[in-house]
Every structure is written in structure tokens, then in C-alpha cells.
């Protein structure tokens, strides 16, 4: 009996094999775990999210976290699109403040920010100090500002949106 023949795979051949297997593996896992938009504990006590991802037992990679953040910010932009359109149509010079507004929308909730009429009134008036005061009335401690460092970061964000455009950008 002879020795088994071992195929000499180079990196590209291995990548090709992996890329063909990947979509099938995705389909198999999706068949086992229907999409779950909110985390839920399974019968074994494992908190799962999405297509069965065990979110308590596995570290999230930087790439995955960045993808999720980008997706969330796109959703925030979509929710705020009508309000931002109105603001930019009247005040195109407010564009450098939008990243701060989107970040605040992500932290507080885009729907809350979209429906905050008093804030949008101050934004339309370009009264940036009043915008900062309005934003400071949010209950930040209930969101992300429970520690001193987080409160400083949130207040820095609020102050940045009210700073002169040269400073905010």
C-alpha cells in the first residue's frame, strides 16, 4: 500500500476553497438559527443575537464592531434625513456640525432626536448656544454618561456642536 497523495495547495487555492464553502455554511447556520433582531437567551442559557451568534461567549472583532457601528449610523442618518434636509436647505453652512448631530442621534436614539422639536427650532435659528443648552437637558446619565469620563465626553460632544464651525470641524 502506497502513501496517500497530498495535494499541494497554495494560499490562493485554499482561499478559493474557503470562499466556495463560506456561503453554504452561512445558509446552514441560517437554517438552524432564524434571524433574531434582539438578544434572547436560548434553552442552554446562552444569550444569542442575529443568526444565533453567542454574544456572551465570543469576543467581537474590531471589523464586526465597526460594521455594526457603520450600519447603525446609516440607520441614524436615514431617520434624521428629513430634518437634516430641512436644516441644510436653509443653512448649508451647518454641514460641518452634522457628524456631531449624527453621533448624538446614535447615543440618544435617532427617533428621539428626530422628534425633538425644540432642538430643531434652535438648529434652524442657528442659535448654537441654545442648541447646546437644549442638548444638555437630555438625561445623559440614563444613556451613556454614568461615569465621569463618559460625562466629559458627552459634554465635549455637545459643546462641539455649539462651537464655531472652524472649531467643530
Image (spheres, helix red, strand yellow):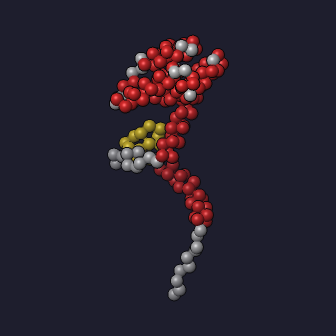
Residue 158, horizontal then vertical, whole percent: 47, 23
Residue 31, horizontal then vertical, whole percent: 51, 50
* Vertical order, 55 against 106 (above or below): below
Left or right: where does residue 85 sit relative to residue 29?
A: right
For the point 61% across and 61% down, which residue is it?
16
Q: Quadrant of residue 73?
A: top right
Q: Quadrant of residue 153?
A: top left
Q: Quadrant of the C terminus?
A: top right
For the point 51% across and 38% down, which residue is it?
69
Between 138 and 2, the one lying in front of the other is: 138
Q: Quadrant of residue 6?
A: bottom right
Between 37 and 63, the one lying in front of the other is: 63
Residue 67, horizontal then vertical, whole percent: 53, 42
* Vertical order, 68 against 106 (above or below): below
Q: Is residue 2 in sight in this rendering?
A: yes
For the point 41% across and 48% down, which residue is it?
59
Q: Is residue 142 in sight in this rendering?
A: no
Residue 27, horizontal then vertical, whole percent: 54, 52
For the point 37% across and 49% down, which residue is it?
57
Left or right: where does residue 121 sit relative to residue 139?
A: right
Amino acid at each position: 500500500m502506497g502513501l496517500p497523495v497530498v495535494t499541494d495547495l497554495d494560499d490562493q487555492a485554499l482561499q478559493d476553497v474557503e470562499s466556495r464553502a463560506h456561503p453554504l455554511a452561512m445558509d446552514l447556520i441560517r437554517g438552524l438559527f432564524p434571524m433574531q433582531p434582539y438578544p434572547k437567551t436560548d434553552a442552554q442559557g446562552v444569550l444569542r443575537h442575529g443568526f444565533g451568534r453567542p454574544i456572551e461567549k465570543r469576543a467581537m472583532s474590531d471589523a464586526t464592531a465597526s460594521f455594526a457601528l457603520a450600519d447603525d449610523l446609516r440607520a441614524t442618518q436615514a431617520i434624521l434625513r428629513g430634518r437634516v434636509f430641512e436644516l441644510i436647505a436653509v443653512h448649508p453652512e451647518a454641514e460641518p456640525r452634522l457628524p456631531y448631530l449624527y453621533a448624538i442621534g446614535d447615543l440618544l436614539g435617532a427617533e428621539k432626536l428626530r422628534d425633538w422639536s425644540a432642538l430643531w427650532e434652535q438648529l434652524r435659528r442657528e442659535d448654537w448656544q441654545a442648541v447646546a443648552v437644549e442638548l444638555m437637558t437630555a438625561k445623559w446619565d440614563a444613556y451613556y454618561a454614568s461615569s465621569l469620563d463618559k460625562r466629559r465626553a458627552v459634554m465635549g460632544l455637545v459643546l462641539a456642536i455649539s462651537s464655531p464651525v472652524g472649531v467643530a470641524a
